[in-house]
Amino acid sequence: MKRTSMVMAVTVATGLLSAGTASATGWTMSYLPIPPGSGLARVVATDGAGHYAGHSDGKLITWADGTFADHGIPAGYESVETVDENTAGSVLVNARSYPAQSRHAFVFENGGFQPLGKVSGYSNTQGLGVNNRGDVVGTVFNDIRNGSIAALWPSGDRAHPVLLNVRSLLSPVDIDHDGTVLLNEQFGGAWLWKDGVLRQLVLPNGVFEARGIAIRDGRILASTPMGDRLWTAFDTSEEVPSTMNTMALNGSGLVTGWISAPDLPKTAVVWSPGNPITRLPAPSEAYGVAVGDNGEIAGALQGGGHDNTPVVWRRG
């Protein structure tokens, strides 16, 4: 059953600013509506055109045109966790069945949950990213405590996943629209895989470890012990202002996340190369989660009576 409610738009003034941080002139914050009585709701992803996806009390929720839709759970499962969404509105989720302790990845599209195919010898699947072509990257495994194997579900045949020819210490994180897969190496750096070829992200001198966060249109976000960085090619990167903890980026290089400010330990911010960090308006602690190609930012409020309340920031 689908339940809807109207979105409430509010403009929130900013408070104190930390050094090197600009005011949020021109940005407004809107609350995303949630199902009545919802104990926990989170926005996770966007199609880049003003639509959003997340979950509430273990059910898939999408938002469009100021309303929400509750899409429930795949038959035979107890809960879902939303992972990603592409420009076609296809939403990647991971479903759990607690009695059987099983996990399975689905793509919600055309009004229904479409299961991703399994690999012979592995009972569980986990989706980690979907690109605009509809390719899905993720893992297959039996007991997750014993590790997992990187896998790719091509858009034209998600019933037959392909195991990536990478060593077991490499774990997928995200997939770009051209099929490039971002992977993290245990106790090592971040890598890019495409068409069977691996390339490691080149790190600054003296830095030996990186954790990939996201990839969009050839731009890569990753964290290092010296702070987060933005790569525009596998061998070209720049430092994100050192006070920022990044969460996501769009194809234009607009980055969101949070900083620790004097008045709010977790303050939602946005940044792009050549510009200062800009603090987003919020009545409490907050952080950005997803950035659409339309420049809208989805995120959450925390504290002050808010419990991961889903919100959207827009310019103008």
Image: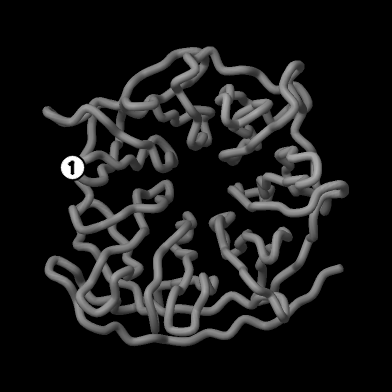
Q: Secondary structure at mark 1?
A: loop
Q: x, y (%) of residue 139? A: 60, 29
Q: Is residue 169 left or right of residue 262?
A: right
Residue assigned mark 1: 226
Residue at 30% across, 34% down: 210
Q: x, y (%) of residue 247? A: 39, 53
Q: How many marks?
A: 1
Tell which of 121 and 203 is nearer to you. 121
Tell which of 242 and 254 is nearer to you. 242
Q: x, y (%) of residue 32? A: 59, 75
Residue at 66% across, 45% down: 92
Residue 225 sits above or below residue 153 on the image: below
In the picture, the quarter occupied by the C terminus is bottom left
**Occupied quadrant, residue 43:** bottom right
Residue 287 sits above or below residue 67 on the image: above
Residue at 48% across, 60% down: 294
Residue type beneath disc 1 = Met
**Neighbours of disc 1 within 10 Å: few (<14), some (14-19), many (20+):** few
Residue 46 sits above or below residue 113 on the image: below
